[in-house]
């Protein structure tokens, strides 16, 4: 069996020559002839046509279970090859042996749904706003207001970790106490994804501390902390993991160079995430439909028994564009709004209600302009964000 890496290239060389350069650089070769480089571990060119290149890497090249090493092979020095003007890793087809070296998510879509007892609709979430600056008490008040409006998930911003103005332990205790109170009053259960991102030597201890103080979900900035950090958390913690993709656009934004989001999605599923930000079909960071579709399917399709992962639509979401995103993602997703909740003229709770109403309209296949007539929070939101 072999791993197949798919690339899009731009080069002054003929495509077959450029493809051969990639295969050599990423397996046994170098820039000149060296005795012993022509051996069974050498990567093979499968397709070299136009801008499309596919390279087959024998599974013996890989250390099973070592995602950093996988990336060294399939996304390593090739990005600096002078022979290539641009190159983009478009997709990776992993052999069963490498996939089976990973446990995948401890908590997938089905397990997360059972925890908060939301089984048959999209989950609706928000990000604490303002992004940073609130103390633990202020954070807990915003979180409670959102859950009173019917939201299923509250999460930290990607830049909030354990700063002095909002220490993590104090924040977790304040938010979870507030959510427990809301649940007691209303029956509404919700996740709080606390950001535990830090260095490799501290991240498991920090995450376990968050759980010990009541966290029912943790969050990691996977590209700054690393896929191995995510895998360590998934294997050791008994709570779901929300995965933020901050920094991804440094290599996903250019359609001709870098790495496609679908590769990140596959690695996150291997490493054990429960939820992953994948982009929007309509919003401030909307991407090409095809790329969203690929990432969505990589997280939810059958994949050698690994549990399914929630794609998260986030970034410029508000009630008016909820339907476009749910049309793309379907029921098994998380629709998440920050400003689209907290910026509502009548406050956070009204903003949360409006988001839930927009989802209800989609579930009932009723246009927003009809649904808003009997739902004042939605009506106000649609008028405000025309």
Image (cartoon, helix red, strand yellow):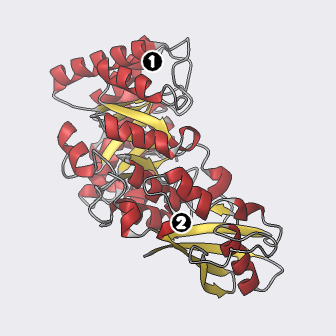
Q: Where does residue 374 sit, x and y in percent of width and height?
A: 26, 44
User: Is residue 320 shown to the viewer in this render?
Assistant: yes
Q: Is residue 374 above or below residue 23?
A: above
Residue pictured at 49% horizontal, 68% vertical: 60
Q: CA distance from mark 1 to mark 2?
A: 41 Å
Residue pictured at 61% horizontal, 66% vertical: 89
Quarter residue 18 falls in? bottom right
Q: Is residue 195 above or below residue 261?
A: above
Q: Where does residue 136 sit, x and y in percent of width and height?
A: 44, 13
Residue pictured at 47% horizontal, 36% vertical: 220
Crowding near pointer 1: few (<14 within 10 Å), some, many (20+)? Answer: many
Residue 126 has which mark? none
| Left or right, 200 with reference to 217 | right
- Tell me the quadrant of the picture where the N terminus can be found: bottom left
User: Is residue 286 shown to the viewer in this render?
Assistant: no
Residue 168 has which mark? 1
Q: Nearer the viewer, residue 267 or 338?
A: 267
Nearer the viewer's eye, disc 1 or disc 2?
2
The numbered mark, 1 or 2, whose residue comes first in the sequence reads: 2
Residue farthest toward the front in the current orientation of the protein: 35
- Determine whether the residue tagged by mark 2 lies in a helix, strand or loop: helix
| Left or right, 328 with reference to 186 | right
Q: Where does residue 257 sit, x and y in percent of width and height?
A: 70, 64
Quarter residue 308 falls in? bottom left
Q: Which residue is mark 2?
A: 61
Q: Nearer the viewer, residue 275 or 17?
A: 17
- Count the labels in the image: 2
Residue pictured at 58% horizontal, 50% vertical: 284
Q: Where does residue 148 sit, x and y in percent of width and height?
A: 28, 27
């Amino acid at each position: 069996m072999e791993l197949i890496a798919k690339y899009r290239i731009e080069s002054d060389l003929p495509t077959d020559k450029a493809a051969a350069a990639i295969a050599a650089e990423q397996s046994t070769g170098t820039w000149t002839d060296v005795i012993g480089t022509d051996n069974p571990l050498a990567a093979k060119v499968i397709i070299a046509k136009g801008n499309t290149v596919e390279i087959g890497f024998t599974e013996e090249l890989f250390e099973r279970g070592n995602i950093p090493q996988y990336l060294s092979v399939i996304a390593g020095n090739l990005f600096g090859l002078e022979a290539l003007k641009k190159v983009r890793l478009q997709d990776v087809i992993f052999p069963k042996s490498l996939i089976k070296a990973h446990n995948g998510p401890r908590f997938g879509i089905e397990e997360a749904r059972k925890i908060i007892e939301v089984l048959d609709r999209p989950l609706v979430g928000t990000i604490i706003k303002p992004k940073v600056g609130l103390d633990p008490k202020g954070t807990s008040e915003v979180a409670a207001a959102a859950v009173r409006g019917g939201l299923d998930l509250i999460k930290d911003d990607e830049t909030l970790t354990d700063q002095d103005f909002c220490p993590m332990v104090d924040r977790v205790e304040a938010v979870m106490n507030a959510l427990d109170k809301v649940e007691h009053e209303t029956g509404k259960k919700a996740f709080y994804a606390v950001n535990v991102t830090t260095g490799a030597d501290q991240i498991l201890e920090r995450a376990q501390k968050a759980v010990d103080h009541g966290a029912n979900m943790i969050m990691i900035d996977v590209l700054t902390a690393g896929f191995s950090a995510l895998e360590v958390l998934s294997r050791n913690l008994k709570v779901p993991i929300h995965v933020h993709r901050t920094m991804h656009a440094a290599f996903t934004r250019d359609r001709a160079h870098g790495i496609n989001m679908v590769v990140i999605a596959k690695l996150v599923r291997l490493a054990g995430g429960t939820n992953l930000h994948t982009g929007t079909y309509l919003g401030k960071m909307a991407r090409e439909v095809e790329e969203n579709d690929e990432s969505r399917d990589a997280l939810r399709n059958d994949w050698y028994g690994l549990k399914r992962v929630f794609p998260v639509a986030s970034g410029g979401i508000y009630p008016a564009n909820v339907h476009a995103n749910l049309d793309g993602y379907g029921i098994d997703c998380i629709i998440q709004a920050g400003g689209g909740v907290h910026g509502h003229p009548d406050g956070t709770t009204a903003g949360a209600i409006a988001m839930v109403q927009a989802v209800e309209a989609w579930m009932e296949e009723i246009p927003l302009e009809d649904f808003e007539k009997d739902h004042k929070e939605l009506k106000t939101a649609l008028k405000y964000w025309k």
